[in-house]
């Protein structure tokens, strides 16, 4: 009898913990009204319904809690509980996401899917080992160079002041070493940076450039896919473990279904965003095949500096092996 009482108390305590209502504070850089913000709104509504109101999502959009590095830090200390972030932020947690930093490696969604499938176990498991759970993982389009003056070749880009995420010391050092002019800024300062001339080139997704009206100043786009932007909705394990297992299952299914729908739609939105911006003055500059070769040669020259800095050495080596497999298909 004496042994049964503690067991009953433990069971009661766990049940009581799970029975509490949970408010998940989730941040994102995406402004209200964007597709990425809309994903979170839909997620919150479906979570509330599926959990009978026991789990509610409170969204902090538009970078109100800071850049993505700030979001990771605030999740670690419990100020927020989750985030919808790009690989820029999630690499703070899991170095395998640095694989998506490789410039010009991906030129089709088939290639993105191939690499992501090869790295999927590492992307998920290492994130969990470091205290966070991936609820859904998607790509949010291609990064292109936007600039105030036409850019066709690497030397054109060298003449510009390039936006770099504040705190991204590795990218800053890499660009400086190869003769470029990186300017670290908070995402919330990009528009004012363009307006004042502090920066005049940015590597962004066209949908973000459209939503933030950045193309009104950086009105030239180099029509060359620089990289793929991978993003994820994550939650810290402490918050996740406070949620009843049956709710966890439903919430995860909802997140993955919404993510799949978002990605399928989003993969067709980049071209539409470019067409809209062209109507309002964006100039799209298409490089010649010879100019594209210049960019590829530049990236290959940068490989020794990318390995072990921008991309963790083991991840870089694995990525190069995957690249060979991809090219031999």
Image (cartoon, rainbow, N blue to C red):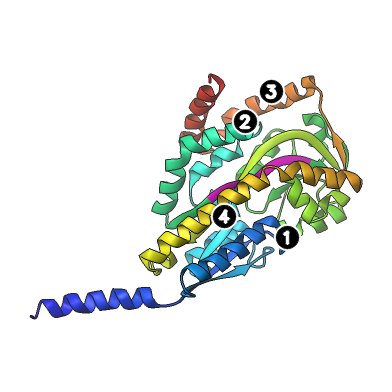
Comparing 256 with 235, the one in front is 256
Give whichever of discs 1 and 3 has the lower sequence position: 1
Between the C-alphas of marks 1 and 3, the distance is: 33 Å
Q: Residue at x 44, y 47 (%)?
A: 124
Q: How many marks?
A: 4
Instruction: Tell me the tag on residue 297.
Output: 3
Q: Residues within 10 Å of mark 4 (few under 14, many from 20)?
A: some
Farthest left residue? 1
Q: Quadrant of residue 74?
A: bottom right
Closer to viewer: mark 4 or mark 3:
4
Q: Residue at x 78, y 19 (%)?
A: 290
Within 10 Å of the Cα at label 1, are there few (<14), some (14-19), or many (20+) other Cα atoms?
some
By secondary structure, the bulk of the magenta-drawn segment is best described as: strand
The image shows residue 279 at horizontal and vertical percentages of: 90, 46
Report the Cα–Cα distance between label 4 and label 3.
39 Å
Mark closest to the chain's N terminus, 4 or 1: 1
What span is colored magenta in the figure?
137-145
Give the residue number, with chain letter if any, for mark 2: 105
Mark 4 sits on what residue? 258
Q: Quadrant of residue 176?
A: top right
Ranked by sequence position, the earlier of labels 2 and 4 is 2
Q: Are marks 1 and 2 in contact (CB under 8 Å)?
A: no
SS at circle 4: helix
Question: Label 2 neighbourhood size at 10 Å, few (<14), some (14-19), many (20+)?
Answer: many
Whether residue 9 sits left or right of residue 244 in the image: it is left
Residue marked by disc 1: 188
Asked if the residue at tag 1 contacts the one at tag 4, i.e. Cβ–Cβ closer than 8 Å, the answer is: no
């Amino acid at each position: 009898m004496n042994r049964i009482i503690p067991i009953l108390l433990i069971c009661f305590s766990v049940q009581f913990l799970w029975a509490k209502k949970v408010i998940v504070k989730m941040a994102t850089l995406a402004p209200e009204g964007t597709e990425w913000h809309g994903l979170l709104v839909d997620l919150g509504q479906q979570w509330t319904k599926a959990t009978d109101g026991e789990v509610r999502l409170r969204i902090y959009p538009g970078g109100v809690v800071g850049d993505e590095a700030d979001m990771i830090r605030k999740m670690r200390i419990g100020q927020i509980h989750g985030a919808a972030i790009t690989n820029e932020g999630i690499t703070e947690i899991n170095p395998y996401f640095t694989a998506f930093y490789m410039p010009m490696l991906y030129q089709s969604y088939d290639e993105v899917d191939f690499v992501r499938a090869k790295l999927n176990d590492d992307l998920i498991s290492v994130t969990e080992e470091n205290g966070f759970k991936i609820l859904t993982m998607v790509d949010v389009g291609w990064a292109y160079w936007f600039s105030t003056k036409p850019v066709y070749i690497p030397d054109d880009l060298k003449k510009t002041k390039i936006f770099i995420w504040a705190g991204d010391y590795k990218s800053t050092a890499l660009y400086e070493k190869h003769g470029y002019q990186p300017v670290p800024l908070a995402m919330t300062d990009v528009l004012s940076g363009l307006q004042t001339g502090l920066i005049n080139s940015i590597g962004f997704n066209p949908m973000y450039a459209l939503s933030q009206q950045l193309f009104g100043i950086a009105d030239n786009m180099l029509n060359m896919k620089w990289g793929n932007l991978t993003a994820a909705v994550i939650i810290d394990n402490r918050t996740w473990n406070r949620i009843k297992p049956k709710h966890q299952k439903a919430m995860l299914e909802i997140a993955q279904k919404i993510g799949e729908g978002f990605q399928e739609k989003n993969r067709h939105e980049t071209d539409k965003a470019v067409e809209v911006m062209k109507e309002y003055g964006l100039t799209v500059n298409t490089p010649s095949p010879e100019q594209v070769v210049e960019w590829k040669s530049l990236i290959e020259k940068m490989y020794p500096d990318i390995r072990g800095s921008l991309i963790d050495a083991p991840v870089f080596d694995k990525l190069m092996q995957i690249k060979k497999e991809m090219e031999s298909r």
